[in-house]
Image: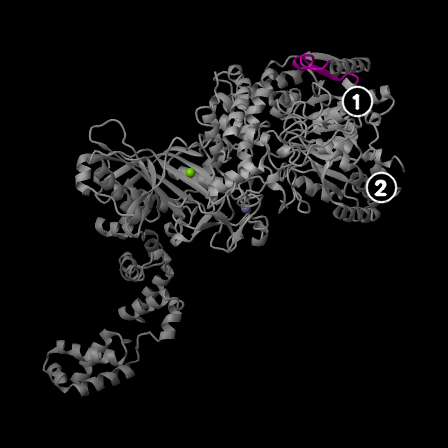
Amino acid sequence: MSEITPETVRHLASLARILVTDEEVEKLAKELDVIVESVATVKGAVSADTPATSHPIPMSNVYREDVVKPSLSQQEALSNAPDQADGKFKVNAILDEE
Amino acid sequence: MSELHKKPASELAQMLRSGEVTSVQLTELFLDRAEKLNPLTNSFLRINRETAIEQAKHADELIAAGKAPSVLTGVPIAVKDNLTTTDAITTAGSKILENYLPQYDSTVVSKLRAAAMPILGKTNLDEFAMGSSTEFSAYGPSKNPWDLERIPGGSGGGSSSAVSGFLAPIAIGSDTGGSIRFPAAVTGSVGAKPTYGAVSRYGLIALASSLDQVGPVTNDVLDAALLQDVIAGHDPMDSTSLVDSLGQMADFASKTDVKGLRVGVIKQLASDGFHPGIKARFDESIQLLVDAGAEIVEVDCPSFEYAVSAYYLILPAEASSNLARFDAVRFGQRVLPEGNPTIERVMAATREAGFGPEVKRRIILGTYALSSGYYDAYYGSAQKVRTLIQQDFEKAFAAADVLISPTAPTTAFKFGEKLDDPLAMYLNDVATIPANLAGIPGISVPNGLAENDLPSGLQILAAAKNDGVMYSAAAGIEKLHNDKWGKRMIDFAPELEVN
Amino acid sequence: MAKAELMDFDEAIEKYEVVIGLEVHVELNTNTKMFCGCANEFGDQPNTNVCPVCLGLPGALPVVNGKAVEYSIAIGLALNCSIASDGRFARKNYFYPDLSKNFQTSQYDEPIAFEGQLEVPVASGKVYNVAIERAHMEEDAGKLSHVGGAGRIQGAEYSLVDFNRAGVPLVEIVTKPIFDSGSEAPELASAYVRQIREIVKAMDVSDARMERGNVRCDANVSLRPKGQEKLGTRTETKNVNSLRSVENAVRYEIQRQAAILAAGGEITQETRHWHEDKKYTSAGRPKSDADDYRYFPEPDLVPVQPTEELIEEIRTRLPENPASRRARLQQEWALSDNEFRDIVNSDLLDEIDSTVSLGVSAQSAKKWWTGEIARIANVEGKEISELSVTPEDVAEIEKMITDGKLNDRLAREALSGVIAGEGSVAEVVSAKGLEVVSDDGALTAAVDKALAEQPDVLEKIRAGKEQAAGAIIGSVMKEMRGQADAGRVRELILERAKS
Ligand SMILES: [Mg+2]
Ligand SMILES: [Zn+2]
């Protein structure tokens, strides 16, 4: 059974902010379906009480002193900005005009 | 000095100290080679002649004043292009960062600068280190110096081809699932992935944060150890950076006696799926070890069966989040769709145009693995498999000091061979992935020529933080091989010639 | 956007059961941000308190501010929460241009503090026991401003982002649903927020100034017909940034939702925005299944595991809890319930407490703060906290009154001078020459002059009508430009009239 439908791909692509053409959606759905079917074997490998590992080397309580360090200058901060105005990063409107 | 470029860094360092050669001479030698040969290998995305020479002059001054800060002071080096540098565009092999000049140096690069090692340039990689062949670089693939029609491994094919083609004496790589070790195996060179946290990740453009580790790419084990000594150490800018020192790797690498060494052969990584030539070389190496007095034990790691699957859930999941910052707001490319688009549409169009197919594939796969309703089954289960793999390793290292396997199932394949079959590409990493999932150190050393007279690699793994044990074993096996072959395997490589 | 149809509040409470839930974000007043060493200050020039970490540049990594963890534990303890022995950070993934990494580093299923409760008294004397679900650490986003469209997000031509606020440490405190508050729901909501403010201010972990966004409240409101088990659909009103707004917004939502339900309509689950100027909420982003934050444990940060010793040490440093402090102060100050509630409601407890501790009587302190100072704040349309008057100023003025150096009118003039920024009390008094004239010679001359000018009044006084002296006092005070002690002037008039 196909788990990854074109609809799923469209939804995921929108969550991930990637524009996809209809062609790409079809292709990705097929590819991902094969991959997902293959990696899904992990489900059968573990049980409810198997602990999860998120960090390979166990460590805890790593903290920084609350002491101010030099920041970038405004010019440095904006040096790679695709667009800027008034010392700020400039972006297109957030909402569509109604 | 005709063969100077083939000398290991350890020897070049001695010559620098004794005054036989200057850093400027060495740096120019490698810059000349790189500029001449890069059109063949596409190892470098950028060669920084000016800054490298400047750094070499600085190194020469320090050496002359008797103030060399490191054993490797003055030895030039190549750096993978996913480590930020303030004096060179850093692209991570992606179009989205085409003109990106970072505002800060990665910690590893800062350490190279502190050691006064001239940086020759930035090396090619699969886009954001996603791949095993460099075919996914937005700037074209790198070529394997042994056969220019074949891949140099990936993602760090730029560094492996630069070192095995002697365009650079040593290089920096990064290894998330084998990106240092696999390229080393298919180019007859040496590549080590230190214990997770031994080398700072600050300034390494993240692929999968819990798997990524920076490490050395060299032509022999001692060089790798020397380079790890330069780049390792606690970094307060990286919360996962190890606090304790693991010792001087160069000291460990000078111990080459394998007598009494308990060598574990992983049952699951000893036969299935490995090409016959790879398997034959591997068996020969086991015999060499036995003859030298090592003790061979078979270890069982049943959960390795699920390692590749767990890896291809964890990696895309973390990558999908790490790569969210490429959004056309603060840096990088911005693509403006027609009309009067919202920033949301600008982001989507930029990411569509700026990311290549493999990156998009993995981002969408990772988004799926984390999405509500699927998290437990996919990402959650993968994290649990990770626990099982760690438990397998724990048992194995109770019985053995180091574990060995072939580094990769095949020798270098031809361009395009696996490009349309993501799963086949992913299986290249079957032997290297478990070390990343468990955070343990691994190294690939040359293991003789296999299919098509191309190099194969032997992987040596040690328990977490036992990088020293790994270097001793690797140096021991390397010595057995060199004694047998009469020279380093890299010395069998064909000369690169520009017609 | 027009105001919605509203139902009369009492009618709404009659028909429906109100359920509220409150999320309060408290900005910590640490020196630096949550995950980097940039100054925790955002009144500065835009994008000057930023670094690779809080700008989300490629390769940058977070490191937790230990002080922020301690402050968060303190808040948890003050809210009678359990403190997690093993907490973690998680990534909340969503794209927004003010979110530099396009994920917020927050806490998900392992918050630092959980399962607490807070007793909140309201005017009726009833004390609500508000159950706290959790308090977790997270980072703030940058600040967006909109250009065109009157500065609003709707209709804006483009937007600008300042990341100075990005990464500022926040503690988000979430209540469990609060039932059974009925008509007191709006008041309870604001009393709860006030109490959180008092707590974090007393502990000095936040500047706690709502007008600056140090404390921000999102109010969830839902209604259900009385007797119905199932919870109604809720709305989440954001941007309620004063105590008054909290109360008004909850009241408004109750009335708005009641009108919709009574008309047979359905409540849309959505975020709404409170407009304090026009006193209404407007629809924001609809909540939908598309909201999928794909939380997963932050791989770049290691677990937060506070030790018992640390927790106990923080506990010993906690200030008195607000409820017992209030009870103590009311008793010490000997104020009636009504008088004391005035103080609490006008948020002047700390100011008056400090003033009293400088030796001023409770009655006088109360008189100054809830009287003249509150009046000036009101006239200037400011919060009292925004006026530049301190308990020290009030104490000094009071002392001058006691010493006979100022009379009531002069004291008020001195105060308004201080508030107008003309200097300290002493400076204002001397610059304006406000001190009471106690030189009898000058006063006697003025009295004689006034008596001579009004012989009819002089006659009356001589005839024993001492109350007639009032007219002369008035003339003398006018002559002395108010700077005389009225009592002394009266004495002198009687003395001179009879001589
Ligand atoms: Mg939150
Ligand atoms: Zn910062």
Q: Tag 2's secondary structure?
A: helix
Q: Whole-percent x and y of residue B166?
A: 80, 34
Vertical side of C245 occupied by C439: above or below: below
Q: Tag 1's secondary structure?
A: helix
Q: Disc 2 beta carbon < 8 A from ligand 2?
A: no
Left/right placement of residue C17 relative to residue C243 reads: left
Q: Which mark is residue B16?
A: 2
Q: Give the range drawn in magenta.
A: B258-275
| Chain letter for the residue marked with disc 2 in the picture | B
Magenta highlight on residue B51: no
Which quarter of the figure is the N terminus of chain B placed in? top right
Local crowd size for mark 2, using a 10 Å CA cut-off: few (<14), some (14–19), many (≥20): many
Foreground residue, C262 or B233?
Answer: C262
Q: Whole-percent x and y of residue A64?
A: 56, 41
| Chain letter for the residue marked with disc 1 in the picture | B
Foreground residue, A5 or C291?
Answer: A5
Vertical side of C263 occupied by B265: above or below: above
Quadrant position of residue B363: top right
Closer to the N terminus: mark 1 or mark 2? 2
Residue located beneath label 1 in the image: B476
Q: Which residue lies furthest to the left in this view?
A: C463
